[in-house]
């Protein structure tokens, strides 16, 4: 018998464990705020790439991730939208669907959903207590490892029929990579998180390709050379069939609101999806290719459910309109590839609204590349406001201005997102556009401000 003390900002809780790792709490269970604060504290462990800890932790709670089929989705950009579409279609087909994504925008519980419903606070408390007991005394899981285990446990408790699982960081050593999926997808490859994944697209592709398993088919989105060669070599080595966008499946149309899909066994015309941006056609194609593969492997999906699921899909923080007069748009683009896509969308927006002025509110993390990010956007904007999310790793608006003094000498600095939004609205006409971008963390703060919500402290 042994005991350990877990500190947090609310109280100190003494928990003892027997040899069977059963928790015998000597005080009442933690409140939900205290539970979230405990999770926040795990961020002090940083990011540790590797699978040994998550595998050990899951084994101690009965390997919940082995109790349901999984569709595993990675990539630099587009994986969240692809996951949301896939889950919505499966749910419309009558399946009980678990969806795990990251990061969240406002509420920690956004990360873990069953049939669109966020994990209840009571289930967060219960799951965290169980996993804390299972972690002691020798495991020190990171925030993402702990949260991934919590998701797997919740999905097992809810007896889901299928799980749509978004990779967190990279793939090869990401905590989600303990699963043996029905099928996998890699949506795009671009430079991001270079400190962990490498400084070239080939190195990043190698990490992303780590989710490819022997014999498990993999869907590839719009991936250029040499990254696609790296991924296909990995697939060939482990005997995984590869299905490529524009070769084996495709979506065609001017926008997701009216498009057609041609796959390797399915053809559908006049599909409609409310997600904005022509780039979503690629994500839609990857989603439907995954759906085809899942259907072939026993997860039944009908044409009616495909259409219904796409019409009902929602994915916050990606080209999302959150205010009117002026139009306030938020987009979580945070790397150069995503900025190029955003610039294409805003260029079209301005083409059909030539009188509208564009104000860009930008906040970024310190490990990003603001000059490269803003390069495709600067020709489009009339006003640039630099600010920062309320996170230690966020670059200050003044730091961004210094980095951009030659590229955007006209940039203004606002000390907080609230100040930035007020500044933008003050100078904008009703017909103008205010676009908030550069970080999903900033997008979450702006959305919370507009909705009058409080932010969950765990946001990494």
Image (cartoon, rainbow, N blue to C red):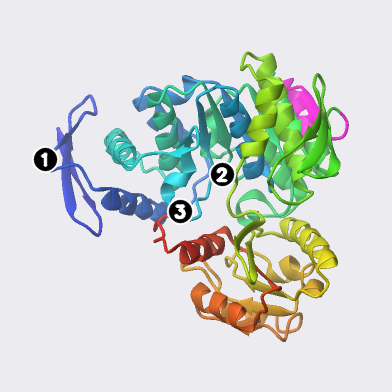
Q: Residue 188 placed where, x, y %?
A: 74, 44
Q: Label 1, on which residue?
A: 26
Along the line of sight, the residue nearer the viewer: 416 or 394: 416
Tell whether position 404 is magenta: no
Q: Residue at x 63, y 32 (%)?
A: 309
Q: Nearer the viewer, mark 2 or mark 3?
A: 2
Helix, strand or loop for disc 2: loop
Q: Residue 99 placed where, x, y %?
A: 52, 35
Q: Quadrant of residue 360?
A: bottom right
Q: Quadrant of residue 385?
A: bottom right
Along the line of sight, the residue nearer the viewer: 245 or 136: 245
Q: Label 3, on which residue?
A: 46
Magenta segment? 231-247
Q: Quadrant of residue 79?
A: top right
Along the line of sight, the residue nearer the viewer: 151 or 232: 151
Q: Residue at x 66, y 75 (%)?
A: 430
Where residue 168 is drawn, which disc sits there? 2
Task: Indicate left or right for 27 with 427 as reference.
Answer: left
Whole-number angstrom distance, CA of label 1 to CA of label 3: 30 Å
């Amino acid at each position: 018998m042994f005991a350990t003390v877990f500190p947090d900002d609310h109280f100190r809780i003494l928990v003892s464990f027997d040899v069977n790792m059963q928790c015998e709490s000597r005080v009442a269970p933690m409140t939900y705020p205290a539970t979230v604060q405990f999770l926040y504290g795990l961020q002090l462990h940083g990011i540790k790439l590797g699978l040994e800890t998550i595998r050990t932790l899951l084994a101690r709670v009965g390997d919940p991730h082995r109790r349901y089929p999984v569709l595993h989705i990675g990539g630099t950009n587009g994986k969240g939208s692809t996951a949301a579409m896939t889950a919505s279609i499966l749910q419309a087909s009558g399946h009980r669907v678990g969806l795990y994504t990251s990061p969240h925008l406002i509420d920690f519980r956004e990360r873990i959903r069953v049939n669109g419903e966020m994990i209840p606070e009571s289930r967060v408390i219960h799951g965290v207590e169980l996993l804390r007991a299972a972690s002691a005394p020798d495991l020190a899981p990171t925030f993402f490892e702990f949260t991934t285990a919590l998701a797997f446990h919740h999905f097992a408790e809810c007896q889901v029929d299928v799980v749509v699982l978004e990779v967190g960081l990279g793939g090869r050593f990401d905590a989600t990579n303990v699963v043996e999926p029905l099928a996998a997808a890699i949506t795009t490859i671009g430079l991001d998180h270079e400190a962990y994944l490498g400084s070239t697209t080939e190195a990043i592709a190698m990490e992303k390709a780590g989710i490819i398993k022997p014999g498990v088919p993999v869907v590839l989105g719009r991936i250029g050379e040499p990254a696609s060669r790296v991924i296909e070599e990995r697939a060939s080595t482990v005997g995984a069939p590869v299905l490529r966008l524009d070769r084996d499946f495709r979506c065609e149309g001017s926008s997701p609101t009216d498009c057609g899909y041609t796959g390797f066994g399915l053809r559908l015309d006049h599909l409609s999806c409310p997600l904005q941006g022509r780039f979503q056609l690629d994500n839609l194609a990857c989603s439907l290719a995954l759906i085809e593969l899942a259907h072939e492997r026993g997860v039944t999906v009908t044409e009616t459910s495909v259409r219904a699921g796409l019409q009902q899909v929602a994915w916050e923080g990606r080209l999302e309109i959150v205010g009117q007069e002026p139009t306030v748009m938020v987009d979580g683009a945070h790397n150069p590839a995503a900025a190029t896509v955003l610039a294409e969308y805003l260029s079209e927006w301005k083409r059909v609204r030539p009188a509208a002025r564009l104000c860009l509110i930008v906040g970024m993390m310190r490990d990003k590349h603001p000059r490269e990010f803003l390069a495709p956007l600067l020709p489009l904007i009339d006003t640039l406001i630099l600010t920062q999310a309320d996170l230690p790793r966020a670059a200050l608006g003044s730091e961004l201005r210094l980095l951009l003094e030659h590229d955007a000498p006209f940039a203004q600095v606002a000390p907080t997102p609230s100040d930035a939004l007020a500044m933008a609205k003050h100078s904008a006409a009703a017909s103008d556009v205010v676009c908030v971008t550069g970080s999903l963390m900033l997008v979450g703060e702006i959305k919370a401000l507009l909705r009058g919500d409080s932010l969950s402290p765990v946001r990494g």
